[in-house]
Image (spheres, rainbow, N blue to C red):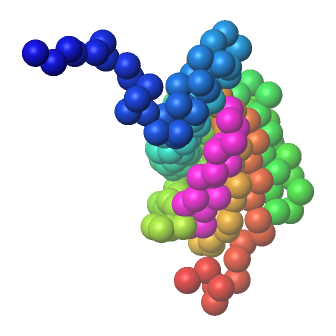
Amino acid sequence: MTATRPYDPTEIMTPFTLHTRDLIQVLSGYGKLILMIIALSFGTATHLNASSEEDAKTVAALDTKYQAAVKSNDAATMDQILADDFALVTGRGKVSSKADLIESARKKEVTYERQDEEPGTQKVRVWGDTAVVTALLWTKAVQGGKPADYKLWFSDTYVRTPTGWRYVFGQASLPVPKTESK
């Protein structure tokens, strides 16, 4: 009868597995905590990217909803989207507040035929709790009895608040020359 020896795992371990086993033993306490933090940060970074993409979609839809509200002079929807300290600066340097835009919509000072982003021009960039939308806007309207038909570039800045995204600042270019806007 052959005597069997007790199992000794070190007999089948290579230098690599011995090193790994030693490393794991050394990593008790702070080392394991550091590894967990690194692993979690990779997961968080992936989550932030996904969240950033979702935020961009949310802000894009909100900005499109805002342009539609302007087009239909829907003061209630504009009021929900605009931050209380909102400011719009036009290409000619005119500054309008939230109250100015809401009042204009209520009085229906402008009758819009078009107030639409040109398809494929909208771009949303998100940095944490701030997002900027840029797009080419085509406006065709009558204001004060005078027709207007032009395109302009705009940048709309949104900020995430405890109650959701709010439109805080807009800047519009001068009308783009007809040959450049197509």
Q: Which residue lies furthest to the left in this view?
A: 1
- Residue 18: % across, % down: 53, 31
- Residue 100: % across, % down: 75, 36
Q: Measuring 64% from the left and 51% from the top, which residue is drawn there?
A: 125
Front residue of 170/3: it is 3
Q: Measuring 68% from the left and 65% from the top, which residue is drawn there?
A: 153
Left or right, 89 with reference to 160:
right
Q: Which residue lies furthest to the right in this view?
A: 93
Q: In which quarter of the image is residue 84?
A: top right
Q: Measuring 70% from the left and 77% from the top, which residue is drawn there?
A: 176
Front residue of 52/144: it is 52
Q: Which quarter of the figure is the C terminus placed in?
A: bottom right
- Residue 113 among magenta residues: no
Q: Measuring 68% from the left and 48% from the top, which residue is drawn there?
A: 132
- Residue 137: % across, % down: 59, 63
Left or right, 168 with reference to 108:
right
47 shown above or below 146: above
Front residue of 13/108: it is 13
27 shown above or below 64: above
Q: Quadrant of residue 39?
A: top right
Q: Which residue lies furthest to the top in this view?
A: 29
Magenta span: 122-140
140 shown above or below 41: below
Q: Which quarter of the figure is the N terminus placed in?
A: top left
Q: Quadrant of residue 10?
A: top left
Q: Is the magenta stretch mostly helix, strand or loop?
A: strand
49 shown above or below 106: below
> How many dots with numbers?
0
Q: Is residue 12 visible?
A: yes
- Residue 137 among magenta residues: yes
- Residue 162: % across, % down: 63, 16
Q: Can residue 47 be seen in this view?
A: no
